[in-house]
Each structure stands twice: as C-alpha cells, then as structure tokens.
Image (cartoon, rainbow, N blue to C red):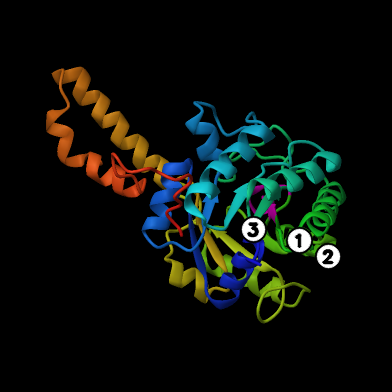
C-alpha cells in the first residue's frame, strides 16, 4: 500500500530540509514536479490573489480544497496547504482537516490571528487568546488522528513575534502551548533575523514531537518583500528547520510576465517581441505529457 502524503512528507523532512515552492494552480504544480522538487505549498495569499482577491480570508474552504486536489492530482507531490484561521471556530477546523486530507494534502497550517486576518508580514495584526487557539489545534489533531491515523500534519503558525503587545518571547510561549495541544509542526511567522530563527528552533527542540532530535517539525517562510532576511535553504537547515515555503514566489514571477506582456500588447498591438520570454507550445505540451494525436490519460502526473 502506498504511503499517505502526510507520511511521505514526514519521511522526507526526517532526512533533510525540504523546499516547498508555492504552487498556486495545477500548472505550477506540474512545473515544481518537473524541476525535481520533493514537495510543494499552497499559499492563501497566492490562491486569493489568483482569484483577484486580497489575503484577508475571503476565499472559501471549498475553493482551497478544490485547488489542493487540482495541484496534487497533476504533480503527485506532498504539500502543505494554508488554512488561514481554520475557516471558523474549532468545529470548522475539524471539517477543514478532513476536507484537506480528502483533497490530497499532506498537512495544513492554521494561524492564531483574529479573523479577518492579514498577511503575516504586515503590521496591525491581532491575535486570538492562546487558549482559544489551543482548542483549535486540539480539534485539528483529533481530526487528523481520525482521518489519517495521525499521519496528516498539523502545523500551528504563530504571528505573535510581529505583534507589539506580544513579541518574540510570547511567540515561543504560544508555540510551546500549541505543541502540547497536538501540533506536529510549528511555523513562527515574521521573524527578523537568523538569530531569532535559530533560537526559536532550539526552544522547540526540547518539546515532544516527531522531528529527528526531538520537538515538532519546524517550518520557515522565505517570502519576498517581507520582514525576514533572504536566507538559503541550506542556511535554514543549519538553523534547525525541516521545510521552507516560498509561498508567492511563482505567482509574483508569473504575474510580472503577464503584466509586461499586456503592456507590450497595449503599446505595440503585438506580442511578437515578447515571444522569447514565452513558454512555447512545445514546452507546454511536454509539461502536460501531451502528444497531439495520442490518447492522453488523466492525470498524467508530472511527479510520477
């Protein structure tokens, strides 16, 4: 019997720090697999932006679940998916875990912000009470045990480091409580230095958890234009992290190309000069595992 997506990602992270590039749609998922990535990530910011919406929690559980299924089907990659604040209170968190698992995700992360949430690298965030979020984590862990025998990964994100009334030490305290509530992985959002990343991971290592050497698995967010310095995958590994997400990188790169292509079309009435920067018909068909005139078999996943 094939290992579940959660089990696959746990095994990978037990051996090395895994890069999880943002895959905002099925095609991005195919390309991630084609380039040899071992896992992927679905960002709430990128998903909502792809819908033409801001990252304030307005996309629905069904929209997230559908996108997870779309990406997993054609990439066969284990992925972590953003679940924002859990689409509601503790009761909805159970449903979210079940839906994400059925859609094919390896795990999810939920965050301790008040709804409507905002990007973790923006100021002005407000957090729910620690005990309230612990209840959400407990319900998520219960649901993961029920639907996957505990293999589905529950990641708890804390935004406390970037909230003036809370701060770094409170972020560590909150994360500790979340681990005791059942989180398999911790995501400290908005850290400002290598030293903070390292000390946070060290503080978690003495806690119970599935990571090699003890403690929960640790997730780092290497987003662009944020509060975190630009670090390499190898640097994050050395700081004690097991996976690194690049949540909006591919979306930003793609939209920059779309913007420039449209600007050229508007200005010149032609995109001929843009052709060297386009994904060719041959490239597209290769990525889709498609040969005209030959039967194509769904999903012809790029990761298989």
SS state under label 1: loop
Residue 42, compared with residue 57, is above or below; it is below
Q: Is residue 129 left or right of residue 236?
A: right
Query: What is the magenta range?
Result: 156-165
Residue at image mark 3: 187
Residue at image mark 1: 183
| Residue 116 located within the stretch drawn in magenta | no
The image position of residue 110, as x and y in percent, is 70, 48
Residue 64, compared with residue 212, is above or below; it is above
The image position of residue 109, as x and y in percent, is 67, 51
Residue found at x 51% / y 28%:
51
Q: Residues within 10 Å of mark 2 (few under 14, many from 20)?
A: some
Residue at image mark 2: 180
Is label 1 or label 3 in front?
A: 1
Q: Say whether residue 224 is visible.
A: no
| Residue 159 located within the stretch drawn in magenta | yes
Residue found at x 12% / y 32%:
273
Question: Residue furthest toward the bottom?
Answer: 213
Residue nearest the viewer, comparing 160 with 212:
212
Q: Quadrant of residue 95?
A: top right
Q: Is residue 72 left or right of residue 287?
A: right
SS state under label 2: helix
């Amino acid at each position: 019997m094939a290992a579940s997506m959660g089990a696959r990602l746990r095994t990978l992270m037990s051996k090395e720090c895994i890069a999880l590039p943002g895959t905002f749609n099925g095609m991005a998922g195919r390309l991630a697999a084609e380039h040899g990535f071992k896992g992927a990530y679905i960002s709430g910011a990128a998903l909502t932006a792809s819908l033409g919406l801001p990252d304030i929690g307005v996309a629905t559980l069904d929209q997230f679940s559908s996108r997870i299924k779309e990406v997993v089907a054609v990439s066969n990659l284990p992925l972590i998916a953003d679940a924002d604040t859990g689409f509601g209170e503790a009761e909805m968190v159970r449903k979210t875990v079940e839906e994400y698992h059925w859609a094919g995700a390896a795990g999810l992360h939920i965050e301790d912000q008040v709804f409507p949430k905002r990007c973790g690298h923006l100021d002005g965030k407000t957090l729910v009470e620690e005990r309230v979020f612990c209840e959400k984590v407990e319900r998520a862990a219960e649901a993961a045990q029920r639907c996957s025998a505990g293999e589905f990964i529950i990641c708890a994100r804390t935004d406390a480091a970037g909230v003036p009334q809370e701060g770094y030490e409170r972020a560590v305290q909150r994360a500790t409580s979340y681990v005791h509530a059942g989180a398999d992985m911790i995501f400290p959002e908005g850290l400002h230095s290598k030293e903070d990343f390292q000390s946070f991971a060290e503080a978690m290592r003495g806690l119970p958890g599935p990571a090699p050497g003890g403690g929960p698995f640790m997730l780092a967010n290497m987003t662009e234009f944020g509060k975190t310095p630009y670090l390499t995958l190898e640097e994050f590994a050395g700081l004690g992290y097991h996976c690194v997400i690049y949540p909006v990188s591919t979306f930003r790169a793609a939209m920059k190309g779309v913007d420039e292509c449209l600007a050229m079309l508007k200005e010149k009435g032609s995109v001929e000069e843009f052709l060297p920067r386009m994904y060719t018909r041959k490239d597209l068909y290769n990525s889709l595992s498609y040969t005209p005139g030959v039967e194509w078999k769904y999903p012809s996943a790029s990761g298989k």
